[in-house]
Image (spheres, helix red, strand yellow):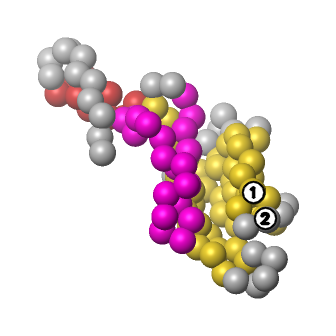
Amino acid sequence: MKFSTLFLYGQKNEGFNSWLGKDTVKVNGEVKSSKYSLFGAAHHFKFEDDEGVSHECKLNFGINFTGVVMDVYLDKQPVIVSPVTSSWVNLFFFRSHNRGDLVLYESF
């Protein structure tokens, strides 16, 4: 299913994910990155704008307590940063190492 669409430098960037754990990133319909992951993955790819200038993009899919989240960095500058980056893996780790006490935290 389509998670999000971003228009960066006039180019259509789309993020897709499936319940089977496959993340796909497309730029103007062309697949730029595809990975399988249970708890999210980082996608690194490049695309060109209308003037032929190359841009580096990093898109992170993840899961936190609100659902699927996405971080976007364009030319190493943040565009979208999720407010909470703690994942279910972190919750499980702290739950299992604190004798069942639930400890929530935010990682920066």
Q: Secondary structure at mark 2?
A: strand
Q: Is residue 72 in the magenta section?
A: yes
Residue 62 in the figure: left or right of residue 11: left
Which amino acid type is marked by label 2? Gln
In the image, is 17 to the left or to the right of 72? right
Q: Position of residue 40 (x, y in %)?
A: 51, 45
Q: Is residue 27 above or below residue 91?
A: below
Image point 30% across, 34% down: which residue? 106
Residue toward you, 19 or 77:
77
Q: Which residue is mark 2?
A: 11
Q: Which residues are magenta?
A: 67-87
**Image coords of residue 83 (percent x, y):** 44, 37
Q: Which residue is mark 1?
A: 7
Instruction: Please tell me in which quadrant of the rendered image residue 74 appears.
Output: bottom right
Q: Check the image and name the residue furthest to the right.
A: 29
Left or right relative to 48: residue 96: left
Q: How many marks?
A: 2
Quadrant position of the N terminus in the picture: top right
Q: Between residues 20 and 15, which one lies in front from this camera angle?
A: 15
Provide residue 102's location: percent of width, then percent of height. Answer: 24, 17
Q: Is residue 37 magenta?
A: no
Residue in the foreground of this view, choosing between 55 and 27: 55
